[in-house]
């Protein structure tokens, strides 16, 4: 997030797109509810009539995967109505003219044709966002899990740059992270393009720095992403170390994924449960869990916080860092003589510019949002105040692209996937918490009541759901959250392996899978 | 959420004979609390709009005929306030006696909730032992609500409205309402039903603000009979990226519950159902306890760390030896702490000089 969570109570206009926040980030959503009570207005764009939609001034039920079209149409109106922040554009951005010229062609009428929204609503959304003094954008995987995920994010940035809604209280571009430390995994350099602290691997200066620190020559070229790695198992990739991820259930295209793991010579899985993925491993190493492990995590607002152990781990379970270090030592890799989580974290702080002002003891109370470039720095709750990190904010000229697969006669319905309030991810954790079944005991497919009737499926009956990659059996449930022609389910239940169906395409830049869009065919289930 | 700019003192008042400064907009209670006075309260929760219902926080103000509720009365310049006179202390004791006598029990286990000991500690402080008004009790338990999370034991309700207000003001859900008036008054859900059928999301905020334990954390209460003291450890929720601060409740190495941290920077006392109630995967019987290696029979078998780590290391050495250093790939977790992700990327970079490392955010 460019702005802190506390800022969510401060905007005049809240624009939520592709985020089912009341279910996926409930405590953040309480701040939005308070902002609304205080008089803020909200625009919600989402294919499903999610709870946030009910609270919105304007709800835009966009067709799945059409976000870029909506955002271009909005930019067109903002430009036409002269709601652009000239001063901000001149002083702080680059390529604004090219963008303004580019959007001239994208009228609300054009965007309406793609998004399925009335042009007047697109116009109104633009006016609400463009006229607000403080407008903030919030989004989650509904924006990123598309083949055009990067385009979506950059389109949102374009809107914020156009109206100067960055670098001030109550504004910004705010992705809500779905996992407790997904931000931290990036901070720590567990990505193919960056060393810890987002230091690019292609910069030779960084290569030299880490060559010295780690005692060996470093590739100047970035690594491949996990998606590519899974595609190359058995051909280029022959061994994998997977820490705490149930790849087989969480990744798209399950058959492909299982096939990939089987093609490896050597798979080591570190986890707290014997997951579906662990079943493919040669070695499974038991890790300590949350509540048993001292450590650090970074939340969605870049706040660096301590995790503390409260109970003894079961059996022989050990912290992940200890396990990885032990493997490294056995391979004679230098620099793994860590004795505590504190040692590891302090080493990270020493080589990451965004953590340079932090250490284990300083983050005791969690008051720092990175970057914290030196010891006297108070942290950075609001990014881009006064200046962008790389000088100027870049406008990107982006055009709309269709999803990897679009509906046709054979697969006429859009399937979109997500999470539910009571279940988390692949339920390795919530599925084992007592009582959760009382509220959510099985997965079901949410279908508009009229579609359900048309397709001849009884409410609560079994349906067969097919995509180009496979078929599953799932219980059908009437829901007014789903618009006609679009159905929804979560990926949390392993007995309803939705990831057999998904995986039609990947964003060319991030290789994030298009989990939010998958054309399907639905019929009553026949034994 | 960290203290915003410190308010600049603009005026002063006299508090128990001492001059203290305050900022416009502060209530007498807030000024008194800042000055270290222990004014008793029951319907007060710093996060909620002041309510003025219990009258326990009354103070004397010169020039005012009757004592005023300090939690709702704004501080004004020149005010002369007394927080503990004999008359006021007597009034407070009487109020507490009334409350104590109406409730079935005044001592509940601390596992019921974060604020559950508030009434009891006030009774101790004022040496009230119930009985004086003993007789009719207000409120009845909703024993039909068999949800596994929230106990609704309305025999202990004192109608402080904190649950109703936290649900409306903090959570924004309006799942709880007040039914009837006066003595028959009772906290309930819309239409007097069970929580599951209401707008309730089981965030647990009502439980954690209840000052008597009328609302209780059923999951934590399962551990009431376990031996040992309740200990608290501050940490962060393991689920989504909001990063809510929580206190883990343990009893002799058993994780028995979770309470929100009222001063948690990301959540300020709020949690959702996952952070509040989904903690018991930790000591679940399905946990992996021993390293496993795949043997010739094709099955995974338990083994010791030495054997497992050697197998793990040998496999990576062999793969890199046969197929080159780019053949080894690491996938770090978005759920494990920094130290896991950091060592994972270091293993790949320092071990092979490559950047064959990613995390699960792409799934
Ligand atoms: S249930 Fe608890 S919080 Fe709610 S009104 Fe009664 S005593 Fe107060
Ligand atoms: S309590 Fe809920 S909102 Fe807070 S971090 Fe946990 S899952 Fe997220
Ligand atoms: S605390 Fe002030 S009236 Fe209850």
Image (cartoon, rainbow, N blue to C red):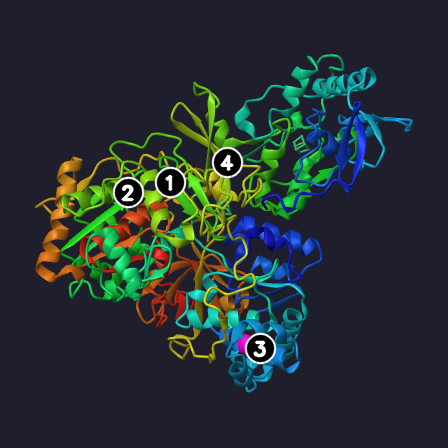
Image depth: mark 1 or mark 3 in front: 1
Could you say whether the residue bearing mark 4 is in a helix, strand or loop?
A: loop
Residue B104 in view:
no
> Which class describes the residues within 10 Å of circle 1: few (<14), some (14-19), or many (20+)?
many
**Is residue A356 found left or right of A202 in the rendered image?**
right
Between the residue at mark 1 and the residue at mark 2, the CA separation in whole angstroms equals: 10 Å
Pointers 1 and 2 in contact (C-beta within 8 Å): yes
Between the residue at mark 4 and the residue at mark 1, the CA separation in whole angstroms equals: 31 Å
**Is residue B49 found left or right of A255 in the rendered image?**
right
Residue B274 in view:
yes
Mark linked to residue A284:
none
* Residue position marked by numbered label 1 in the rendering: A295
Residue at 75% across / 12% down in the picture? B132
Disc 1 and disc 2 on one polypeptide chain: yes
Which quarter of the frame holds ligand 1?
Answer: top right
List x then y, in percent, for residue B323.
11, 61
* Residue position marked by numbered label 4 in the rendering: B148
Chain identity of mark 2: A
Between the residue at mark 2 and the residue at mark 3, the CA separation in whole angstroms equals: 47 Å
Q: Residue A462 appears in which quarter of the rendering?
A: bottom left
Tell which of A28 and B135 is nearer to you.
A28
Between the residue at mark 1 and the residue at mark 3, the CA separation in whole angstroms equals: 43 Å
Tell which of A28 and A6 is nearer to you.
A6
The part of the chain drawn in magenta is A70-75
Mark linked to residue A75:
3
Could you say whether the residue bearing mark 1 is in a helix, strand or loop?
A: strand
Between the residue at mark 4 and the residue at mark 2, the CA separation in whole angstroms equals: 36 Å
Chain identity of mark 4: B
Between the residue at mark 4 and the residue at mark 3, the CA separation in whole angstroms equals: 49 Å
Instruction: Work out whether B326 lies above or below B39.
Output: below
List x then y, in percent, for residue A367.
51, 43
């Amino acid at each position: 997030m460019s702005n802190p969570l506390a800022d969510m109570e401060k905007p005049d206009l809240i624009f939520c797109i592709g985020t089912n926040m009341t279910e996926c980030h409930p405590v953040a959503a309480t701040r939005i509810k308070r902002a609304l009570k205080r008089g803020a207005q909200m625009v919600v764009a989402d294919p499903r009539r999610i709870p946030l939609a009910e609270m919105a001034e304007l709800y835009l039920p966009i067709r799945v995967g059409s976000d870029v079209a909506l955002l271009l149409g909005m930019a067109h109106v903002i430009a036409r109505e002269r709601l652009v922040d000239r001063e901000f554009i001149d002083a702080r951005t680059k390529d604004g003219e090219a963008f303004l010229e580019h959007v001239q062609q994208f009228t609300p009428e054009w965007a309406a044709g793609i998004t399925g929204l009335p042009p007047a609503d697109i116009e109104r959304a633009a006016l609400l966002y463009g006229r607000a003094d403080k407008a903030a954008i919030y989004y989650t995987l509904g924006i990123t899990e598309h083949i055009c995920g990067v385009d979506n994010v950059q389109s949102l940035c374009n809107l914020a740059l156009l109206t100067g809604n960055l670098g001030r209280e109550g504004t910004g571009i705010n992705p809500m992270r779905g996992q407790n430390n997904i931000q931290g995994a990036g901070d720590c350099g567990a990505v193919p393009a960056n060393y810890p602290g987002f230091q690019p691997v292609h910069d030779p200066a960084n290569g030299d720095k880490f060559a010295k620190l780690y005692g060996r020559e470093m590739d100047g070229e970035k690594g491949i992403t996990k998606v590519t790695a899974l595609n190359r198992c058995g051909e280029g990739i022959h061994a994998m170390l997977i820490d705490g991820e149930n790849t087989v259930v969480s990744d798209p295209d399950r058959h492909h994924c299982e096939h990939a793991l089987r093609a490896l010579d050597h798979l080591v899985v570190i986890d707290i449960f014997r997951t579906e993925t662990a079943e493919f491993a040669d070695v499974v190493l038991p890790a300590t869990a949350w509540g048993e492990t001292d450590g650090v995590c970074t939340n969605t607002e870049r706040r660096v916080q301590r995790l503390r152990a409260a109970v003894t781990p079961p059996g022989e379970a050990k912290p992940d860092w200890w396990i990885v270090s032990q493997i490294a030592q056995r391979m004679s890799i230098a620099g793994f003589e860590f004795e505590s989580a504190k040692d590891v974290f302090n080493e990270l702080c020493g080589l990451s510019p965004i953590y340079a002002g932090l250490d284990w003891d300083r983050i005791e109370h969690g008051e720092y949002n990175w970057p914290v470039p030196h010891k006297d720095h108070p942290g950075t709750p609001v990014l881009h105040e006064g200046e962008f990190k790389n000088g100027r904010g870049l406008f990107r000229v982006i055009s709309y692209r269709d999803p990897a697969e679009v509906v046709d006669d054979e697969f006429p319905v859009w399937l979109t996937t997500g999470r539910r309030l009571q279940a988390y991810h692949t339920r390795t954790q919530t599925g084992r918490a007592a009582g959760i079944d009382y509220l959510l005991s099985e997965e079901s497919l949410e279908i508009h009541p009229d579609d359900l009737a048309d397709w001849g499926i009884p409410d609560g009956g079994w349906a067969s759901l097919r995509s180009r990659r496979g078929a599953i059996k799932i219980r059908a449930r009437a829901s007014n959250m789903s618009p006609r022609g679009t159905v929804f389910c979560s990926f949390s239940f392993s007995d309803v392996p939705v990831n057999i169906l998904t995986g039609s395409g990947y964003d060319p830049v991030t290789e994030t899978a298009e989990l939010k869009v998958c054309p399907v065919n639905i019929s009553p289930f026949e034994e | 959420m960290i203290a915003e700019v410190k308010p600049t003192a603009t005026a002063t008042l006299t508090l128990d004979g001492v001059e203290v400064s305050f900022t416009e907009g502060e209530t007498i209670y807030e000024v008194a609390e800042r000055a270290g006075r222990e004014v008793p309260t029951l319907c007060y929760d710093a996060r909620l709009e002041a309510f003025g219902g219990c009258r326990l926080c009354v103070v004397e103000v010169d020039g005012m005929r009757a004592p005023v509720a300090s939690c709702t009365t704004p501080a004004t310049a020149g005010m002369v306030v007394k927080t503990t006179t004999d008359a006021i202390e007597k009034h407070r004791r009487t109020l507490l006696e009334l409350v104590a006598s109406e409730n079935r029990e005044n001592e509940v286990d601390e596992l019921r909730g974060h604020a559950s000991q508030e009434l009891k500690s006030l009774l101790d402080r004022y040496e009230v032992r119930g009985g004086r008004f003993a007789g009719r009790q207000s409120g009845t338990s909703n024993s039909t609500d068999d949800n596994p999370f929230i106990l609704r034991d309305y025999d202990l309700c004192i109608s402080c409205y904190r649950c109703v207000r936290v649900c409306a003001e903090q959570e924004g859900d309006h799942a709880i309402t007040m039914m009837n008036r006066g003595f028959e008054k009772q906290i309930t859900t819309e239409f007097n039903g069970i929580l599951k059928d209401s707008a309730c999301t089981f965030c647990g905020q009502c439980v954690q603000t209840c000052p008597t334990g009328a609302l209780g954390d059923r999951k934590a209460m399962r551990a009431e009979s376990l031996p040992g003291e309740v200990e608290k450890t501050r940490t962060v929720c393991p689920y989504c990226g909001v990063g809510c601060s929580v206190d883990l409740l343990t009893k002799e190495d058993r994780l028995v519950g979770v309470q929100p941290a009222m001063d948690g920077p990301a959540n300020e006392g709020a949690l959702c159902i996952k952070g509040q109630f989904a903690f018991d995967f930790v000591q679940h019987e399905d946990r992996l306890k021993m390293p496993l290696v795949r043997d010739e029979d094709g099955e995974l078998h338990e083994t010791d760390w030495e054997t497992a780590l050697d197998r793990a290391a040998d496999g990576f050495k062999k793969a890199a030896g046969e197929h080159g250093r780019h053949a080894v790939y690491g996938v770090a977790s978005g759920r494990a702490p920094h130290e896991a992700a950091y060592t994972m990327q270091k293993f790949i970079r320092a071990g092979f000089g490559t950047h064959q490392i990613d995390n699960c955010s792409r799934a």
